[in-house]
Amino acid sequence: MNAPSASHAPHRRAIWLAGGGLVLAVLAAYQNSLAGPFVFDDVPAILQNPSIQRLWPLGPVLAPELDGGLTTSGRPLVNLSLALNYALGGEAVRGYHVVNLLIHTLAGLTLFGIVRRTWSRLRPAEALPAAFCVALLWLVHPLQTAAVTYVVQRAESLMALGYLLTLYGFIRAVEAETVGRDRLIPPADEPRRDQRSRPTSIAWQTMSFVACLCGMASKEVMVSAPLLVLLYDRTFVAGTFREAWRRRGRYYLGLAGTWLLLAWLVAGTTGRGGTAGFGTTVDPWSYLLTQCQAIVHYLRLVVWPDPLVFDYGTATVSRMGEVWPQALLLVALAAGTVLALVRRPVWGFAGAWFFLILAPSSSLVPVASQTMAEHRMYLPLAALVALAVAGLHSRLGRRSIVAWGVLAAVLAGLTLKRNTDYRSEQGLWADTVAKQPANGRAHNNLGKAVFAAGRPAEALAHYADAIRLQPAVPEPYYNLGLALARLDRPAEAIARYEEALRLQPAYPEAHNNLATVLLAAGRLDEAGVHYEEAVRLKPGFAEAQGNLANVRLEQGRGAEAIRHGEEAVRLDPRAAAARYNLGNALVQAGRFPEARSHYEEALRLAPDSADVANNLGNVLVELGRLPEAVSAYERAARLDPGYADPRRNLAVLLTHLDRVPEAVPHLRAYVQLRPDDQAARAELARLQALARP
């Protein structure tokens, strides 16, 4: 097919106005999404991801040493985008939402360009309004919130932008080729204009290839892009696969070459840390049956987007009898797509778009961490919207635009409403539990949100529900242990941590927190064993390194204490506890100047810590900086009036400085806190006598 004639080409101003309208629609639909906190997978992928905290050198950003199950693992462009966010605004969540919204808007504008230029090949006069309706409905549909409002799922939207730009670059390259063919025999006075048309086509092909590479570096779903571009060529341009290959074989070889990058990235994640691929706990047949249920559910949400669920959990279907109606429907739709590709290629292309993009995550290859997820419909939704717009337009003509405008307003309102569920982590998980009461992971995460809000007793019930629903999952036992420890129920906490470790022996966080409870119970050697195991399992676990340093100090193994303390500080320079523990180890080794620097940094990081201020005072005494030591002890006493040690230290130091009247009230306060200290009582009597005029 040829490009549309100039007589049907819409005025450039109308195109810009349509694009501006799309941008305004996105802003209207998502204006209440920018303050939503980081939730669920955002935490390990952003807040606990050290690879995004420095932009240079670039190697660790593009190939971070992360758990293969993280959303950013094996997706260097996603991790780079988060690193750019971090460089610009640290952990301020608004900037991450703004970038997500920008990616979504650019994807919508690219879709607008694709539909307009494609429609122009079929019905030029209808191209602009039809493309506007398709892009508008796609942009504001509430189903898209799963990939836009949920920060880390920019992996989906970034991949989709690469996918769409790959196709858009191909379309522009074909249009440039058409211009070149029309000028093969140029007028005598235009010998050079034709020479410039071919490089333009190559430039667009290059852009398409780069976009395809970027998509492959964003998410594995991009794997179908080269095939879909070839199918587009056959459907709308060349007419046959043979002709498409004859004209642009090298271009398609280039696109296929991007699979090498994808294969390398996938191999590096080792099955996404055991959460995806044929080696997971979910067998392919059960996953396929589950996808029959999932895809039909997605189709229903396209038409009636309620209820929208943040997390569907990991449940699977085990018997065909549970989903045979959905399976029959999908077989019929797939067969209809194949038939349409032969008889009505345009309609068949839309069906192929839907199935090819969904296939990597919604077929035989299990994704055990999420057997259903709404964000997977982000790009497939475009085909369904385009079919709906085309179908209604064929019946109502331009009158359909009014209907689509009203529907877009309703969808935007539903998107605004859905975004309110993301305003707090607790609200989001409460909404998920209400809609999916059998989802153990949702109960567990609601418990975590309640616990983080300072209500550990309330969290117990949610953890109990999670254990009841998923008794073989270790995390709820671990979280229950945390809540019981916070409620000062150490024996029960120990039992829950031990159960978590029975289910998953390689659980460094459980080892670390079990050790903490054991240490508080005076079981020093047992605590050391578990801290050591936590460090062995996860050498980059800064908290465990610091805790092990503290235990080794208590055991009299000072050199080891310093080594683990220094490693904890290296891993997390902002951890006040690590600085404090290292300072204690250095004091025992007599390295007072170094200890002082760590205490001072710990006090800067945790200015309300009376322990740090008191120990800083001790070091300053050793260094002979007595006035500064007085200030440090006074700060400790002021921070915690019930803390006896700085009172005693102040009394001793002030007495040494011949400031006996000042020492008396501090020693009196100490005696009130430690009434059984007879030596202090005698000293107080002596000082009171000296202080009398």
Image: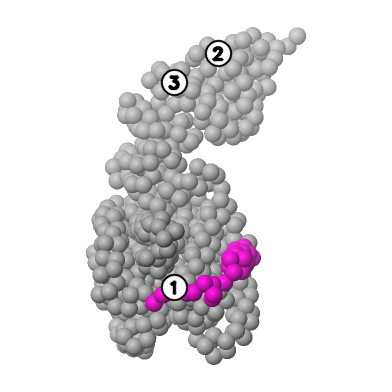
Tell me if residue 27 is in the magenta stretch: yes
Which disc is residue 625 wearing?
A: 2
In the image, which residues are magenta?
A: 1-28
User: Against 442, is 680 above or below?
Assistant: above
Q: Which residue is mark 3?
A: 594
Q: How is the image coloured?
A: one colour
Residue 496, visible in the rendered structure: no
Confirm or deny contact between disc 3 and disc 2 (CB under 8 A).
no
Q: Secondary structure at mark 2?
A: loop
The residue located at (55%, 35%) in the rendering is 606
Give the mark, 1 or 2, whose residue is nearer the N terminus.
1
Neighbour class for label 3 at 10 Å: few (<14), some, many (≥20)? Answer: some
Q: Position of residue 202 (x, y in %)?
A: 36, 58
Q: Amino acid at mark 1?
A: Ala
Q: Amino acid at mark 2?
A: Arg
Q: Position of residue 506 (x, y in %)?
A: 29, 51
User: CA gap, disc 1 to disc 3?
Assistant: 74 Å
Which sits in the foreground, 447 or 317?
317
Q: Position of residue 600 (x, y in %)?
A: 53, 25
Q: Which residue is mark 1?
A: 3
The residue located at (57%, 13%) in the rendering is 626
Is the magenta region chiefly helix, strand or loop? helix
Q: Position of residue 519 (x, y in %)?
A: 40, 40
Q: Secondary structure at mark 1?
A: loop
Judged by depth in the image, the label closer to the viewer, 1 or 2, is 1
